[in-house]
Amino acid sequence: MIPALEVRELQKRYGRVRALAGVSLEVLSGECVALVGESGSGKTTLLRAFNRVVEPDGGVVLVKGRPARDLDPIRLRRETGYVPQEGGLMPHWTVRKNAALVARLLGMADADERADAALELLGLSPNEYASRWPRELSGGQRQRVAIARALATGPEVVLLDEPFGALDAITRAQVRGHFKAIRQELGTTSVLVTHDLHEAIELADRVAVLRDGRIEQAATPGVLLEKPATSYVARLLEQAGLAAAIEGGR
Amino acid sequence: MSARRGRVGFRAGWSVWAWIIILVGIPLAGLATAPTSATSAAPWPAVTSSARPVLGSDSSLMAAPRIQSTRPVVVASKPFGESYLLAEIFAQLLEARGHAVVRRLGLGSTEVAFGALRTDAVDVYPEYTGTGLLAILGEEPSGTRGEVFRRVSREFRERWGVRWLPPLGFENTYAVSVRRETAEELGLATLTDLAREGEGLIGGFSPDFLGRDDGLPGLEEAYGLRLRESRSLLQAVKYEALRGGRVDVIDAYSTDGFLARAEVVVLEDDRRFFPPYEAAPLVSRRFFEERPAAVAALTELAGLLDEARMRELNGRVEVEGEPISSVAASALAALGLVPSDHHPADASIGGMDGSAGGLAAAGRPVAVGPSGARAGSLPAYLWDRRDQTLQEIRRHLLLVGISLLAAILVAVPAGLALERVRGGAEGVIRGVGVIQTLPSIALLAFMIPLLGIGVVPAIVALFLYSLFPILRNTYSGVRDADPRAVEAAEALGMTPLQVLREIRLPLAAPVIMAGVRTAAVINVGTATLAAFIGAGGLGDPIVSGLALSDPWMILAGAIPAALLAVVVDATLGVAERGVAPRGLAEE
């Protein structure tokens, strides 16, 4: 089976800083992969290479087996769901117009209906929220609009960059719950960037731990917890209190 | 006034600005000329082919009287009373001889007036031989009346084809003056006497006089004069300061109306320090070659105006506030050049007509001071000239509106383009910002050789001043538009054009509008200076009022200009909020 997304030996430098130092990873269709790491580990750069917001210096990105550099970047971005950090809503557009953006860019005649349906899916009743301005929403609501915008077109792949990062603990749990439910319902292939191991383990089918532009370990949560491949991963688990939890469970 | 003789130093500093303006201005100048030249062919088909298109279009904008075969004679003056009066005398004489006239009175300075004449944008204005020698030719003061006249005649003809017509018959030189009581007390009759008593006296001089080699520094050297103190005073307050005893010595001009008064004594220049300043009509090459009949009409004035008569005429204008047109008409009648029942054509300049004619006609008023002769109150005066004020406001708005619109059409796309290339953008914007540092009057004066005088060069100058605020705000507004929104828009697959049109521009709109607002308010203020190059507007009464020491007339321009600035600012403030996207929080 051809992976939905794949990178091979991906490299990227920003001046002297090496963001990606030869990363290889496959994301299977319908799978949710979490990219975990500290800031500067290269996880966001890797995410953005999938929709050509970042152009790599070396290596290849394959989208359903085709090299991404052969694809029209504008088209690729439109067809890939994307939830930027802190939402990135257009402040001068209503909630509905924001949620309908990608559908409109793809020329879908029913963009507004799709937007409303996606908002509904994320628990934002269109009647109540569709005509509001982003500034009239809470942080969690804004984040849900951003997710709705990514899902409204029914994409095969969604890329999420710290989608729950800026939220308080309660809202975070809520939005996370929404995401989980939707993924189960839609089966969308997802790549999720997070610095929170708990989140990664709760949501993802597989977790890739990045450090200094390399993948330390890519495995299912179970394997990761039981057999950390490197001392770095073990320390990371320990710091998150996960290693202890496992030991306690034994 | 200080502008009378111009300043030699003014020209040296030009070369730097000149290059900057040439680089920036010429393409723009071409832009501004192109659309109007098409319309200029209509009024005077016979002449326009050889005429500068700018002048033609400008005159048509001025709604000059339509005549079939000849274009009107453009009569100009510099911005002080005597120059206005002489120009008005020229104009009325030409009209009486059947020549249509367009008046361009109160042009900013010697540089502006002569620049306009040299480039055929003006046909005639009154000039002084000493000014020609010192300020225009840049030579040393030397020679007798006749020698100086012959020298400037030859040089002007050879260099520019510009002609000095025969002198009018009077000299207007510096006249160092004291109070009569001072003169009697200290026994002062000559400048040599003044040098003897100088240690105890305070001088009040125009800024011009204080700095010029043929002013105070030269005088100090020639006579060994040392005053206790020298203050810089404007013409308008100098006489009052002398009368009130706050200063003891002033520089006056020998034909000033104020000198006719008994309480002032002019000290004799016994060492002949001051060069001769003979007044004569200065005419352009084209006018001299193409209009012999009009030139002949002007030569009728040769030798007819002596110093005593000039002093009396100036006094009627400057001391008594009589309208210049009526003083000019009665002077021409008294000289027998025009029948006394001749009615001058509408000769209003800056609202002088009907201002205080009634009182002046009733006899010499006892009241003194520049506006002492005015009847009624300031509000009544303003109300009386409301039609004229409205016309001036209309012209003012025309100048500001067209220049602003053009600047928006150029600066907004330019700002967007700069934002796309980024590299070097700050440099370009700083470069355009240099225009802002040019003194307005210098920029206006520089327009003359390129575009003549009147509305077109004024609009181009205002356009140049408007560019910077709009360009800078467009660039930074678009650059700084909500970076998260812009980044998301790009990552979601909007094309650069879509990002610009749907995200950056709407978010930057209030910032761009703020730039337009700044430019508009600056323009309303700067446009008052456009009167110096004959573009009209609310600067007209300000320039005339300054020249005639008439505070009411100054206010007649200044008050509406200030109100206009406030209204424009408020209106565009509303527009600024109007273009702000609704989703943005009201800050």
Image: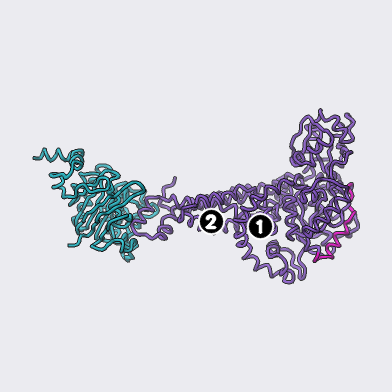
Colour of chain A, in one word, is: cyan
Tell me: A239 left or right of B474. Answer: left
Nearer-the-camera pick, B400 or B134: B134
Q: Residue at horizontal 88%, vertical 39%?
A: B271
Q: Where residue A23 sits: x, y (%)?
A: 25, 52
Q: How far apart are marks 1 and 2 (CA)?
A: 19 Å
Where are the magenta residues, as a range?
Answer: B289-307
Q: Note the chain letter of the purple one.
A: B
Helix, strand or loop at label 1? It is: helix
The answer to which of B477 and A126 lies nearer the viewer is: B477
**Residue B394 visible in the shown view:** yes
Asked if residue B138 is among those painted magenta in the image, a careful observer would answer: no
**What x and y, as percent, mark residue A14?**
35, 49
Q: Where is residue B147 in the image (x, y as percent from the top left)?
A: 87, 50
Q: Quadrant of the N terminus of chain A?
A: bottom left
Query: Which residue is nearer to you in this view: A68 or A170?
Result: A68
Quadrant of the rendered image containing residue A114: bottom left
User: Callout 1: 10 Å neighbours few (<14), some, many (20+)?
Assistant: many
Q: Which residue lies furthest to the top in this view?
A: B200
Q: Is residue A63 above or below residue B482?
A: below
Q: Is residue A153 left or right of residue B562?
A: left
The x and y percentages for residue B208 are 75, 42
Using the image, name the chain to which the residue with label 1 belongs. B
Q: Which residue lies furthest to the left in this view?
A: A250
Residue beneath disc 2: B411
Q: What residue type is labelled 1?
A: Pro
Q: Is residue B323 visible?
A: no
Q: Quarter of the image for the C terminus of chain A: give it.
A: top left
Question: Callout 2: residue from which chain?
Answer: B
Q: Name the residue under label 1.
A: B457
